[in-house]
Amino acid sequence: MSLTREQLDHLGRRLQDERRRALDLLNRIVGDRSRESWQQSAGDLSAMPTHPADIGTDTMDAELDASNATRASRELAEIDAALERLHDDPAQFGRCERTGVEIPIARLDIIPWARTCEEPTG
């Protein structure tokens, strides 16, 4: 049995909500990095030298931001692909790409861009 119109509408709204969340996260990360970059280019006005631990913390923060931005970008691409699938062929939306069986609605409600019945292992 295919998803009902109500379920498809609900999943479409969930995808739009998740898309906004991912975009907001990306914008925050880019905005924070841009602001920090501007502050660094303005120069350190302190007479105290930068402590190596501060440099390490800054590097770790930049790497964490880059990792989060990459994850959010990938998630955004998956969400956009799911919105396209939902729009192009609603009757097939929610079917596992590997087996062709319906993805449980509980899974789709949590991860509305899911392409498979379960996460691949290994």
Image (cartoon, rainbow, N blue to C red):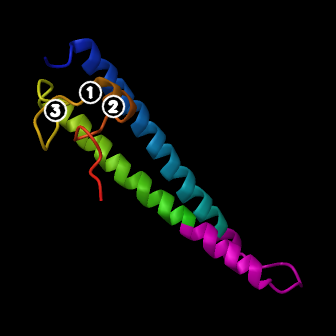
Mark 1 — residue? 104
Residue 23 lies, in percent from the top left, at 45, 45
| Amino acid at dot 3 | Arg
Left or right side of 64 for 117: left
Mark 3 — residue? 95
Q: Reply yes or no: does residue 32 show up in magenta.
A: no
Where disc 2 sits, the SS reads: helix
Where disc 1 sits, the SS reads: loop
Residue 50 lies, in percent from the top left, at 79, 83
In the image, residue 38 above or below residue 112: below
Where disc 3 sits, the SS reads: loop
Residue, x 20% and y 37% (percent of image)?
Answer: 84
Mark 2 — residue? 107
Residue, x 35% and y 32% (percent of image)?
Answer: 15
Viewer-closest of 55 and 110: 110
Residue range highlighted in magenta: 37-63
Viewer-closest of 37 and 101: 101
Left or right side of 81 for 24: right
Viewer-closest of 12 and 98: 98
Look at discs 3 and 1 and give the one toward the viewer: 1
Label 3 or label 1, whichever comes before in sequence order: 3
In the image, residue 106 above or below residue 30: above
| Amino acid at dot 1 | Pro
| Mark 2 surroundings within 10 Å by alpha-carbon count, few (fewer than 14), some (14 through 19), many (20 or more) | some
Circle 1/circle 2 CB separation < 8 Å = yes
Q: Toward which corner of the image does residue 48 lie, by quadrant?
A: bottom right
Q: Is residue 105 visible?
A: yes
Left or right side of 34 for 46: right
